[in-house]
Amino acid sequence: MDRRSVLKQMAVLAGIAAVAGKVGAQQPFVEVNPPQPTADTGKIEVIEFFHYGCPHCRDFDPLLEKWVAALPKDVDFKRVPAIWGNPQLKELARFYYTLEVTGQLHALHGKVFGALQTDKVPLNTEEGVRDWIGKQGVDQKRFMEAYKSFGVQSMVQRADQVARAYKIQGVPTLAIDGKYLTAGSMAGTHENALKVADQLIQRARAARGK
């Protein structure tokens, strides 16, 4: 790492320390051990680990959406649903990936939290998914075919593997470039978690010498 990159790293660490100082001595992020590979080595990867039944994820989502919309082009964002061996969370992960592969995620992702948590729609069941999705103006037959597909099942299995590799203990949690984890529980608030994530993205960028 050259001198310029070292100076960038020091500036980033100072920014993280400033955020930590506002919320006390608690560490606002942890390092992933061992670091995890990213899908696109040419970009800085950010993963949100979440699940639809989590009220904290629901509160975080509007803030996250605005933050993601402003991310620079060298950052690749994606979500990974947490499962932890729970059959209901596995079914919610299945629903999430079906939304993704059918192109419905952007339109319906935010609505799912309310449907599940407020309206108590059983979106962890095939019948609940079929009934709810049919009321959203979506091609029900096509959606359910994807829901039952091997491709979606493979995505669910891969999500569980990724969350286990990162040793995710709670959600929502943000993973930065396979190297760092931050969350509102670490940084003090959801807003602070996003500030820390910004600093960690800068740190990852400096480490790449960009």
Image: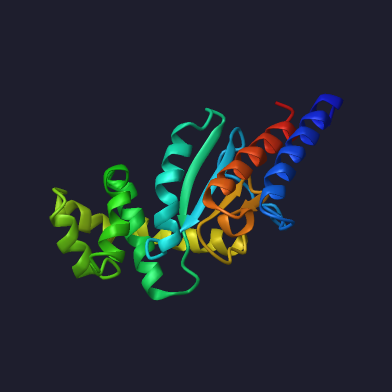
Q: Residue at x 74, y 45 (%)?
A: 17
Q: Residue at x 36, y 54 (%)?
A: 97
Q: Residue at x 59, y 60 (%)?
A: 185
Q: Position of residue 164 (x, y in %)?
A: 58, 65
Q: How is the image coloured?
A: rainbow
Q: Position of residue 196 (x, y in %)?
A: 63, 44
For the point 40% across and 46% down, the residue is 62
Q: Residue furthest right?
A: 3
Depth order, front residue of 3/178? 3
Quadrant of the image containing the N terminus: top right
Percent position (x, y) of residue 40? 56, 38
Compared to residue 188, the image places residue 116 above or below, namely below
**Which picture quadrant has residue 33?**
bottom right
Relative placement, left or right, of 71 versus 59 is: right
Check the image and report above or below for 187 versus 12. Answer: below
Left or right relative to 118: residue 93 = right
Quarter of the C terminus within the rendering:
top right
Tally the numbered discs: 0
Q: Is residue 117 left or right of residue 70?
A: left
Vertical comparison of 147 with 202: above or below = below
